Each structure stands twice: as structure tokens, then as C-alpha cells.
Amino acid sequence: MLFGNDRDQLRRTYVQAWRKYREQLPLEPLEAQIADVIRDHPEYHAFFEHEQSALGREFPPELGETNPYMHLGLHLGLRDQIATRRPPGIDTIYRELAQALGSGLEAEHRMMDCLAEGLYQAQRYGREPDEGAYMQCLRQLQRRFVKG
């Protein structure tokens, strides 16, 4: 795991990457990936521009708010899976969904539901994520949206 259990360091990395991007400063490769995913989500720009509140904000599930760190982290994880073609076939599913939905970002959002569910189930039952169930969920999306 990139940051272990250090939530504050993870959050600082997101905030700093966005600040450096806005100030047109050189970015490390991971910072560039983070800045790209934040750039794709204008609804989070102001959040990350207010560093102190972004670092300390809580997102209790009962309030029904999306946690930007979790949402963007799922994007980063999914993008890494697609780039590394792990699990095998995920890149093809992504390309076909992006074409069918007219947007790579929309394809990612649909696919992230499968990723989030797989991670939730693994955490809930204290086991490794089930790659087979994850790919089955992605293939169901593919069948639903890809004609042919």
C-alpha cells in the first residue's frame, strides 16, 4: 500500500499535488496522476484549494456525502489496473465501455462501482478481493452497454 495507514499523509499528497498543478510547478509521476484525476472532477477543485479544511474534513456515511479521497483513489486504482492490464481483460472492457458510453470518465465511474463493491466485500469478510467476482461484475457492465 502506497501510504500504509497514514490518512493524513495521503490527504496531504492530494492537496499538494493539486496546489503544484495549479501553480504550474513540476510534478512527480504520482502527483501528476493525482492532479489529472482531480482535474477531471471540477466539483472537487474548490475542496482541494482550501487546504486546511480538505485535510481535516470527515465524511461520515450517515451524511451521504461522497468522500473525494475515496472517489479519486478508486479512479487511480482503476486507471492503474487498466494501464497494467491486471486483471487480464480489464483494458478491453474499459475501451469498449468508454466507446459505448461516449466517455472514458463515465466508463471509469461505472467500473468503479464494481471495484468498490469488491473492496467492500473483501473488507467485510476479512479476505482478499475476489478477482473472479470483480471481473464478472465488469463483464455484466460490458454486456449491458456494449452492443455487438
Image (cartoon, grey):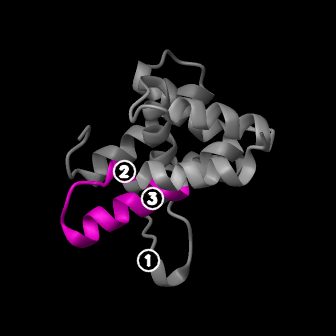
Q: Residues within 10 Å of mark 3 (few under 14, many from 20)?
A: some
User: Which stretch is magenta?
Assistant: 113-132
Q: Position of residue 67 (x, y in %)?
A: 50, 62
Question: Which one is in front in this view, the residue at disc 1 or the one at disc 3?
Answer: 3
Asked which secondary structure carries label 2, the reply is helix
Residue type at mark 3: give it.
Ala
Asked which secondary structure carries label 3, the reply is helix
Q: Quadrant of residue 37?
A: top right
Residue 2 lies, with reference to residue 118, above or below; the image says: above
Label 1, on which residue? 60
Label 2, on which residue? 132
Q: Nearer the viewer, residue 25 or 84?
A: 84
Residue type at mark 2: give it.
Gly
Q: Nearer the viewer, residue 67 or 78?
A: 78
Q: Where residue 116 is drawn, which disc sits there?
A: 3
Residue type at mark 1: give it.
Pro
Question: Which one is in front in this view, the residue at disc 2 or the one at disc 1?
Answer: 2
Task: Give left or right: position of 107 versus 52.
Answer: right
Can residue 128 be seen from the camera position used here? yes
